[in-house]
Image (cartoon, rainbow, N blue to C red):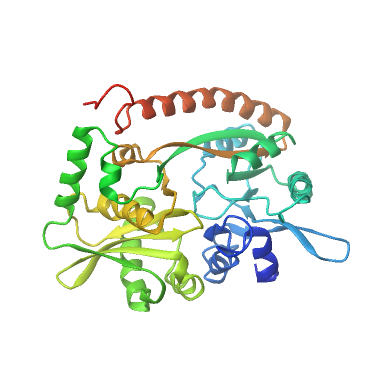
Amino acid sequence: MSAFDRNEWQGLAGTGRDGHGIYNPFLSHAFLSALEEAGCVGRDAGWLPQHLCLETPDGRLIGAAPCYLKSHSQGEYVFDHGWADAFERAGGRYYPKLQVSVPFTPATGPRLLAPPGEIRPSVQLALADGLKAFTGQLGVSSAHVTFAPEDEAMLMESRGFLHRIDQQFHFANPGYAGYEDFLDTLASRKRKALRKERRTALENGIEIDWLTGRDLTERVWDDFHAFYMDTGSRKWGRPYLNRQFFSLIGERMADDILLVMARREGRYIAGAINFIGADTLYGRHWGCIEDHPYLHFEVCYHQAIDFAIARGLSTVEAGAQGEHKLARGYLPVTTHSVHWIEHPGLRNAIADYLERERDDVESFGEMLTRHGPFRKSGHGETD
């Protein structure tokens, strides 16, 4: 990222609340450069930056895509381990591969960064074709564009990429005045259960703080990093983010960060980090050093809804997977990725798999939506 002028990059990614485009904090120069400078991505991490850029003949940047040469499939949240295993059993070499994404971040956002206006579609098409050419030039097996917006996924599908769908759980805020307004939309049994859950979570003298901007001191980052390391070490062995990364984002984008911190007897015992976009709150990591019933749900999901309503944000994205989010007001939403596969045999096998997978994903999403916590319109409250 140091090769890019910050203002030029932001001009393509969306400059923020006062500029063009929908600001996504994960595509910001501040976030991506912090990952690189802290060593969270790089050759040793198996995420070698290989960012694609499109320039005019006089050297002006008019398009870009955040790209990484990957030697594994960790930290992506769109799983292709089975593809890799099958190809290598057949004598192929799946790794390295090209990954177009924000590392360790299962949040939908632009991947083909282009300026607004009439030039935008042609720049995005050029970037899509450029990714295919770049894959061939590098001599790698494939290129994977994950958590792309639907319109970008459809554009790349028209250029021969294979289209894959999955699901996350998001909370939609139509303009609630407060959390009670949201509860009023739920079936009575669900409403009572959530009220009880929130009361239970804050027993034992637990209080919640929202920390953003100047509140994000190094001492606070020390506490949160300890929570993150505890949970990350238990879940996947080696957490992806280091302590330096949190200091860097605290310096560069503190107003775009919300830490929800749980305090008991004068010290923090749990917390969750969220990133604030133009109209979306993105929930990411959670951790704790004390176990209390329902505290995870309170800190990660209920407090995120409270903050989104208070700030007038339209959506809360609560990260990857987790059907337990459904009962707390987060409904299934389709996510998109596209995949360019160089080897014809592997490409055909994956295309067949994706067609069958799509039917399963769509059916499961429809079933979950039917069993959501909201009152059924025209049928009274459900139990």
- The answer to whether 301 is drawn above or below residue 31 in the figure is above
**Residue closer to the observer: 290 or 257:** 257
Residue at the (12%, 56%) spot, across then down: 203
Q: In the rendered image of this protein, does residue 223 appear above or below residue 284?
A: below
Q: Quadrant of the N terminus?
A: bottom right
Q: Is residue 32 above or below residue 192?
A: below
Q: Is residue 5 visible?
A: yes
Q: Residue furthest right?
A: 57
Q: Position of residue 331 (x, y in %)?
A: 39, 37
Observer able to see residue 229: no
Q: Is residue 370 above or below residue 66?
A: above
Q: Quadrant of residue 325?
A: top left
In the image, taking residue 185 as reference, residue 127 lies left or right, namely right
Q: Is residue 133 left or right of residue 287?
A: right
The mark tally for this picture is: 0
Q: Residue at x 68, y 31 (%)?
A: 347
Whole-percent x and y of residue 258?
Answer: 39, 64
Taking depth in this image into account, of 93 and 49 the one nearest to the observer is: 49
Q: Residue at x 56, y 58 (%)?
A: 23
Residue 361: percent from left, percent from top = 48, 28
Residue at far left of view: 204
Horizontal side of 363 relative to 162 (left or right) equals left
Which image quarter is the C terminus in?
top left
Which percent across, then down, holds residue 43? 60, 62
> Looking at this view, is 381 or 317 the one in front?
381
